[in-house]
Image: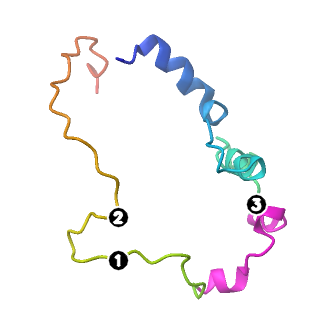
Amino acid sequence: NKANPAQVYPEILKGIRGVYFPSCITASASEIIRRCCRLSPSQRPSLRILKHYIWFAGLDWVRLADRSIPPPTVPRIASSVDSSNFDKYKLDLDEPEEDFSEWAANF
């Protein structure tokens, strides 16, 4: 299904309000994400306020600051070019359609 620019633009304008979160993301977590993604920094919660969200209740902020919290998982990496920890996708060989909209004429 080819994306129609007339359909895509209104979705972009919705911003973070138009983002769907999967069911594994709780309502409180999605609300924190939405608040942190507000366009204006003055509308985003400060770190002082974020620390009091129940979602962060068990976080050791001191250990986080000094980077001594162990990661929940450590991926196994066989070499500098090992990509086995990433999803695999089929190679897209379709040629894109020519774009005659001149969207970048003054770019």
Q: CA distance from mark 1 to mark 2?
A: 8 Å
Residue on which disc 2 sits: 85
Where 16 falls versus 51 (above or below)? above
Magenta residues, start to end: 47-66
Q: Is residue 7 left or right of residue 37?
A: left
- Say what amino acid the circle numbered 2 marks: Asn
Residue ID at (81%, 71%): 57
- Say what amino acid the circle numbered 3 marks: Ser
Residue on which disc 3 sits: 46
What is the x, y in percent for residue 25? Answer: 66, 50
Q: CA distance from mark 3 to mark 1?
A: 35 Å
Q: Secondary structure at mark 3?
A: loop
Residue on which disc 1 sits: 76
Residue ID at (54%, 79%): 71
Q: Secondary structure at mark 2?
A: loop
Pointer 1 local density, CA inside 10 Å: few below 14, some 14–19, many at least 20: few
What is the x, y in percent for residue 11? Answer: 55, 23
Where 76 falls versus 94 (above or below)? below
Where 27 falls versus 104 (above or below)? below
